[in-house]
Image: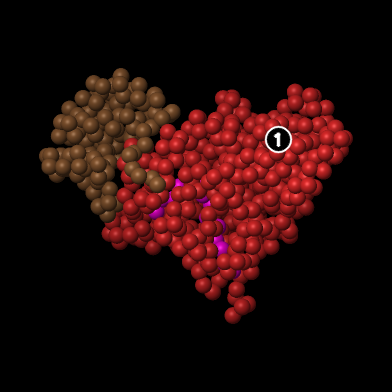
Amino acid sequence: MEYILEVFLDDYRLSKIKGSPVESNIEAVFGGELKVLRVKVGEEVKNEILKAFETARIDSRACITDTPVAFKRALFEEIAKQKSLGEEVVKAVLARIDEIKELAAKESEYLPPPDIETE
Amino acid sequence: MSELYFKRPMPHGGKLVERVITDKKVAKKFLESCKRTKCPVYDIKPTLHYKRGVPVRNVYREIMSVCYGFFSPVEGSMTSAELESVLSKRRLLSGWVFPYPILFDISKEDYKALGVSEGDRLIIRLKGKPFAILDIEEIYEIDPEELANRTFGSPETNPEVVREKFDDKHPGWVIYRSHNPIILAGKYTIINEPIFKPPFDRFWLPPRKCREVMEQKGWRTAIAHQTRNVPHVGHEFLMKNAAYTGDVEPCHGILVNAIIGVKRRGDYPDEAILEAHEAVHKAGYIKPERHMVTFTLWDMRYGNPLESLLHGIIRQNMGCTHHMFGRDHAAVGEYYDKFATQILWLKGIPSYGFDKPVNEVEGGLLIRPQNMREFWYCPVCKEMAYSENCNHTKEKEKLSGSLIRGLVAEGVQPPVVIMRPEVFKVVVKWWKKFGYPFVNEKYVQWKEEELEVDLPDLD
């Protein structure tokens, strides 16, 4: 069975993958207003993710949700770096698991805000 | 035509409770007289989680809401007879509907140290300064676990709407479970008016003042919107559409009334909630003439139908003619039926003391319910659609809180059909201040130290 990791895209993220082969895989929801990439993984990788993060779960759409933000950010970084949506990007993220777990532990204390003008 | 107009309802109980000494000279004399007679002094302490020790409530918020009339006709901490009446019938001894125990609780150690007895006057200090007095009519002991269980009920005692046994995952149950065992019952009087800090100062509108502002604005009809959240577009559509009710024309005003106090982890900070709602009218999504943001101090009990009763009381006291209620009103987890609030207001819940709808029982409310289902985004209609209108149920895209929280946490700006950019900017503004977009343990601790107010010198 295949499981899905959704990666939502804003303008900044879109600019990072512009012109890459990944761009053609962008799906649109909410009337085209929200762009999303879907990374498909198999049973083994899914189990690794669930084992790594106790909050992670599978929802009714077979999506892996409630993973730490650090994991989702790292996933996008790897997609942008490897220009791919293959399972290898998730494996590359899992190779950084110690770093991600350390960041995830700090997530309940601090999350970096987006760099947008607020005044 | 005028016979078709709705009138602003009277305050619950007939008149607004106002127990605040506003004249500083009078307040000072009052305090001096208390000191001459050696009134005991008690410094308010936060209620701490009975297991984890983190703040879950501060009784100062209840004293404020009682004394400024939000909870009219309640005038203070309930006596044992009143408590029993509320728990068994959801009625005050006077017969007026009221859902929750309102209690001034202290520990056995503090009781011993204070040495107070019935008939004494207690000076209550907040942040080290005189704040209020409590004229003690009765002192009695409670079992906090029994109090918590009886406050919310159970699937056995309230089978119409309660689905799961309440436990320590329910924040409201935890608040009552964490009460101290000694109750000092009696009327409160605020003798030193707290000063609200920004941004709270802009949104503080106690019932009498709120009624005056509604008159000035020419709002014959006003519909209340309960919130503990920053508004996404679904909330905005709920407000706009629910307001189409009214009398001979849609409601003149939408009164947003946020509940400010200790909240769940994952909720948004209070400061962001208020300013985000303000952003809705500042950015013109609803005209500011028609939309007003206010708040009530209360550590939410998340009691779904019971909470809706309190909400109805507060907003009737503030002068609203209508109150919108959605799915899962003021709820957390799966403890209640999703539509428990609507069942209460449409049919009644006999096990909670309502064999008829809330507006039809003796001592009930005058504010009218506007029970709404839900809004979703429909890609076929290409608009935010009402679930009872739109038949594209397969294509619908729901705006779930977890979807939006997931986007926000990642720093991904939600699209305009989900959250207005001006609202998101407010979220980020407070995120930058607190280093976190949502309520976390650190925010709760900080909030407990700071509170929403400071107190002027009175001594």
What residue do we see at 15% from left, 39% from top? A22
Task: Classify residue B168 by image quadrant.
Answer: top right
| Magenta span contains residue B221 | yes
State the residue position of label 1: B129
- The reply to whether residue B62 is visible in this rendering is no
- The chain displayed red equals B
Secondary element type, mark 1: strand
Residue at image location 35% in from the left, 25% down from the top: A103
User: In what quadrant of the picture does the N terminus of chain A appear?
Assistant: top left
Chain A, which colour?
Answer: brown
Q: Is residue B112 above or below residue B225?
A: above
Residue A91: within the magenta? no
Task: Give residue A79's position: percent from left, percent from top.
Answer: 19, 33
Q: Is residue B61 above or below residue B221?
A: above
Residue type at mark 1: give it. Answer: Lys
Q: Position of residue B347 (x, y in %)?
A: 59, 57
Label 1 lies in what chain?
B
Side of B260 relative to A14 (left or right): right
Q: Is residue A107 left or right of residue B247?
A: left
Question: Between B436 and A76, which is closer to the camera in this rendering?
Answer: B436
Q: Position of residue B422 (x, y in %)?
A: 39, 51
The crowding category of the residue bearing disc 1, from other C-alpha atoms within 10 Å (few below 14, some 14 to 19, many at least 20), is: some
Q: Position of residue B187 (x, y in %)?
A: 78, 44
Q: Nearer the viewer, residue B283 or B67?
A: B283
Residue drawn at 57 percent across, 48 percent down: B201
A67 in relation to B206, above or below: above
Q: Return the residue nearer the eye: B353 or A4.
A: A4
Left or right of residue B129: residue B385: left
Which span of residues is magenta-colored?
Answer: B219-233
Looking at the rendering, which quadrant does residue B192 occupy? top right
Q: Nearer the viewer, residue B119 or B101?
A: B119
B366 to the left or right of B22: left
